[in-house]
Amino acid sequence: MRLLYAEALKVRTAPRTLIGLVLGLVALAALGAGSTASGVHRSPLGEENTVWDVLTVATTAVIFALILGILIVTWEYRHGTVTQTFLATPQRERVMTAKYGISGATGAVLGGLSVLVVVVTMLFWVSFNLTSAQWQLIGRIIFAAALWGILGAGLGALLQSQVGAIVTTFVWFLVAEPLIGVRFDHFADYLPGGALDRLTARGPVEGIQEGPSGAAYGLWAAALIAVAYSVGFAVLGAASALWRDVS
Amino acid sequence: MIEVEHLTKRYGKTVAVDDLTFRVTPGRITGFLGPNGAGKTTTLKAILALVRPTSGTTRVLGKHYRDLDEPTRKVGAVLETSRYHPGRSGRNHLRVLAAQAGIPRARVEEVLELVAMSRDAKRRVGGYSLGMRQRLGLAAALLGDPELLILDEPANGLDPAGIRWLRDLLRSLSSRGRTILVSSHVLAEVEQIADEVVIIHRGRFVTQSTTAELAARAAAGVRVRSPQADRLRDLLTKAGMNVVVMDGGALGVSDGTPERVGELAAANGIVLHELAAEKATLEEAFLELTGGETTT
């Protein structure tokens, strides 16, 4: 508990990074939601479909959660504070557990914030009532953001380098996975990005076929795969933090 | 207090610490000395469980550091690598550490006062001078009011006033029964405060003794200047002393006392312009032990 509080304090007392991330997310989410809802990309398929489109914009939070997770671990290595952290708590697995807890929590908060921003933005153009399926999507987005926060922290602990971890992330999601997707269609569904797409997939609208067609598995499987990735990276990251010398 | 037994640490093919064994006595200030790259920091990190030894064991207060209950309240450490998140203020840095160790916030203000940093505690650490960072590091080490302090090169980056302040602080902590292990590559920094010294070189143990013993071990010498330097030199050499010509034509005599040199000169009618006992410095003893070259 004490460690969780200390980790939360670390995040809170690094205001510039935090403000930067939050502002970036708010701006992106508001812009995306605004342009979708105001009609530039407004779906001709009716209000319900527009609401789905706008909610999907909130998925942006996942990448921010991932970056914050990376930062929560790597800034300790980058700024050398990891020495003092491990001196105060030499049981490194406890430190890592607290970091994963905070990364998950801040991820969920970013997810929630992002949903809030898109919903509020949408109010300017569309009148709507969220259906239960749409509420479920909101839950899935927040859940995914929490998982990706933990994954980021695990990746950060594995690589220790802030720039390295962030570059790896972008190269993976923007280059590697799409390329793999082109070559091996269904295999790519099982990669982290594929699982994330499934987990945050929008629901069907009456009369139209669902968006990502022919996915290899359903929602529960997607959740399971996403959890497996985040736990996997968390375990690898913790093992790496435990084994490596602090230089 | 601190026990290091057959500690060896290899990084690839490089041997940083080689079968090192020593103990630190409670209640004293022990200087941990060696030239740069001697393995001091690696040894301290192994003691503090930051580095995994290749072989050998280290114990602090009878236990491995990892097994200490509430380590912050027992051991305070300032390592050369103690660094900070530049965006955090000095006070917040300490608050984070206090939170982690379950130490009340009021103690943060106390240690800030102790290291004379209260005024700058609100500023971002990114704007601190090296000396201020060292003070903040010390403040962090003192948070838990520990009985053992481990300081790695704490005088680095301090100006003369800062070094004096540090010395006074360590003395006052020592007088209150704290055990202090302080590393340095400059003997002069610790010779005034250390009761005991452990010297290592190239990762190996060289010697452990009290500071007084080490000083006594350094060979004393005589400095003598004379217009008849050549004659005097022959005489002294014949008398079995070792003579070297120093800068400015003075002679440096080892294995002799000023009395003997003076008597010999008088008996042979040699005029002396200067005759002085060269105080052997610990620095020379240190350099001799670690195979360095003396500058005199």
Image: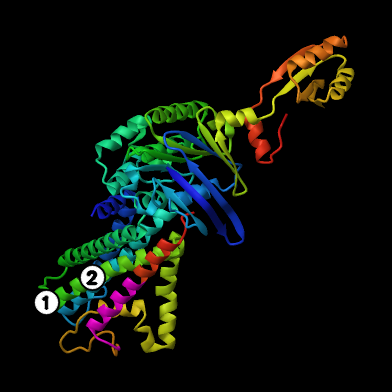
Badge 1 is on which residue? A132
x 35%, y 39%: residue: B146
What kind of residue is marked 2? Answer: Phe
Pick whichever, A111 or A232, lies toward us.
Answer: A232
The figure's colour scheme reads rainbow
Identify the subunit bearing mark 1: A
Magenta stretch prevailing secondary structure:
helix
Pick whichever, A153 or B23, lies toward us.
Answer: B23
What kind of residue is marked 1? Answer: Ser
Helix, strand or loop for disc 1: helix
From where the camera sits, is residue A101 visible?
yes
**Residue B78 against residue A20 in the figure, above or below:** above
- Residue B254 at x, y = what percent? 76, 26
**Residue B287 against residue B234 in the figure, above or below:** below
Badge 2 is on which residue? A143
**Residue B216 against residue B12 in the figure, above or below:** above
**Tag 1–tag 2 contact (CB < 8 Å):** no
Q: Nearer the viewer, mark 1 or mark 2?
A: 2
Identify the subunit bearing mark 2: A
